[in-house]
Image (tube, rainbow, N blue to C red):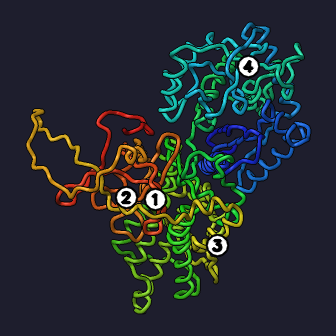
Amino acid sequence: MCDKCKGKYYMTTAIAYTSGKPHIGNTYEIVLADSIARYKRLLGYDVFFQTGTDEHGQKIELKAQEAGVSPKEYVDKVAGQVKGIWDLMNASYDKFIRTTDTDHEKQVQKIFKKLYDQGDIYKGHYEGLYCTPCESFFTESQLLGGKCPDCGGEVVPAKEEAYFFKMSKYADRLIEHINSHPEFIQPVSRKNEMMNNFLLPGLQDLCVSRTSFSWGVPVDFDNRHVVYVWLDALTNYITGIGYDCDGNSTEQFQKEWPADLHLIGKDIIRFHTIYWPIFLMALDLPLPKQIFGHPWLLQGDGKMSKSKGNVLYADEMVEFFGVDAVRYFVLHEMPFENDGVISWELLVERLNSDLANTLGNLVNRTISMSNKYFGGVVSNPGVYEEVDEDLKGLAVQTAEKVSEKMEQLRVADAITEIFTLFKRCNKYIDETMPWVLAKDEEKKDRLATVLYHLVESICIGTTLLKPFMPETAEKIFGQLHAKEREYEHLFEFGRYESGTKVTEKPEILFARLDIKEVLEKVEELHPSAAENADASAKGADASAKGAGASTGADGSNENGDALEEPGIDIEAKEEITFEDFTKLQFQVGEIIACEEVAKSKKLLCSQVRIGSQVKQIVSGIKAHYSAQEMVGKKVMVLVNLKPAKLAGVLSEGMLLCAEDADGRLALMVPEKKMPSGAQIS
């Protein structure tokens, strides 16, 4: 092991199911994992990063039949698409495993036989309600509204002979492990969900084989059965690094296992935090150190679905914005625990504001001024002023701030810290005014010092940015004729070699885009998506004004006594019928993100989760609430208001507010704790 290496770090993504081409929501996971892997390498870890494809099951067998090809031909094509998109997004994985790999299938058979021989697996019959897309059985009580609790799809009665795994045998041991290892399941809300909804009520035995289809790993001692998807798919995390069930595992397995991180979507958290640990216990193997269930990346109208026509693909988005812009967006816009929202408009807005203005303009101005005033030579005469200390202090503190966020896997927050440094650099330019210094020959050394401080700060920020935007970082280093810093050197200001000459013609890193032009191009690819994105609707003026229902405030003092406050009268509107009222759909929404609308003095743009959907709502309440205090609030929402654009931003509903005689607004919130999506009637 090298002197600088901090030790091994084995991490995995969930393996992508080969039922079709992965959309941007699927692609988010590989980009997230790649940024973590690259950051760990920057810290000095010996990283092994595995990803791949899950290629067996009834759904794929049916898809292949529809396509008129064999299941193997079908998965070969889709696995190629998956790998192609992973490579397009610059994923630096070390191994791409396929569950149709011969060595994997052989180990799955041996694992199944071992668990059967030791009494953990037995033969029986299964009768229940089956969801084909999820390949899962459910009882009536587990359904939500008669539909699959995982995907919301239809379920059908099914009965067949099957082998079962004795889950309850290991349940108490798993509960104890979770309680004694608080870092094991993250975020904490996922842990609570697994404990309260599955483990504590008691585990049922798990079906681990099927006879109703043939596309799977055969049970070698009972050829009517194929190994059920989760015992097959989950074991890739050990077979991919050389696990052998007979005790002849490779040196790599001995080195890498247990995994340091399984990165997965929140929809498969149950399989990874309950089934997988129990399988490992039965195999007498250590459990992974951490399982992180990341949230979903949603379109404005909910989870991406081909049936909804709201699917975005990474390769199409890269054509518009470039790889690093797409990487930046999906990483920066995804909250730690709540779902993120993606749209063409948001992508353009972020590219223009963060990438073109904050970062691109900073690099371009710095290089251009260096060329204009010093022929491109960056030197440090050391003429300091008090204003320098704030920039230098922030620059050497940023690495530690980023590290703190990354240790918690708060990737979006880590990126924010880096861009805080870039924004501070832009402010430093405004404070020092190099163009004014350039007019005074006696200020020449001061001007050189200012430009040196900018270049040095950019180099520090760019080193930290590289795990998230690798191509952009290389371009910046190339223009500055600098190299990526060693991590320990990020805490020292002044390592850029004085006298270095920057490039003569700085490259524009990110060109500003026009949203109308982008939407016109989108329409050529996906007409319905463009229409939805640029819908011109009317009737949302009330949302901008923030007007709403009566006060509803609790007017009591600290003793609980009612306080008499003067009421207000407003002009009465025309009476409506009950039928008119029933046309309005009111629900409880949870604000998961909020930001100010550019060039507007009164508008806030909120992302509001309503059940499984997320709506973007623009409201004229900036004078009464900050964007920060909006996040996390449960609010009353008029859901079925026709979408409209306010200050060029699409609004898909209305937040209800009360307004007093002085024009002060208060959001209408539920009196008691209510779930997102609850109907208001």
Q: CA distance from mark 2 to mark 1?
A: 9 Å
Q: CA distance from mark 1 to mark 4?
A: 44 Å
- Pinpoint residue 455: horizontal percent, then vertical percent: 53, 72
The residue wearing badge 4 is: 158
**Along the polypeptide, which appears first: circle 4 or circle 2?**
4
Image quadrant holding the C terminus, namely: top left
* Image quadrant in which you'd find residue 646: bottom left
- What is the three-letter code of the residue carrying label 1? Ser
**Along the polypeptide, which appears first: circle 1 or circle 3?**
3
The residue wearing badge 2 is: 543
The residue wearing badge 3 is: 481
Q: Residues within 10 Å of mark 2 (few under 14, many from 20)?
A: many
Q: Are marks 2 and 1 in contact (CB under 8 Å)?
A: yes
Does residue 417 show up?
Answer: no
- Pinpoint residue 164: horizontal percent, then vertical percent: 72, 13
- What is the three-letter code of the residue carrying label 4? Ala
Determine whether the residue tagged by mark 3 lies in a helix, strand or loop.
Answer: loop
Determine whether the residue tagged by mark 1 lies in a helix, strand or loop.
Answer: strand
The residue wearing badge 1 is: 651
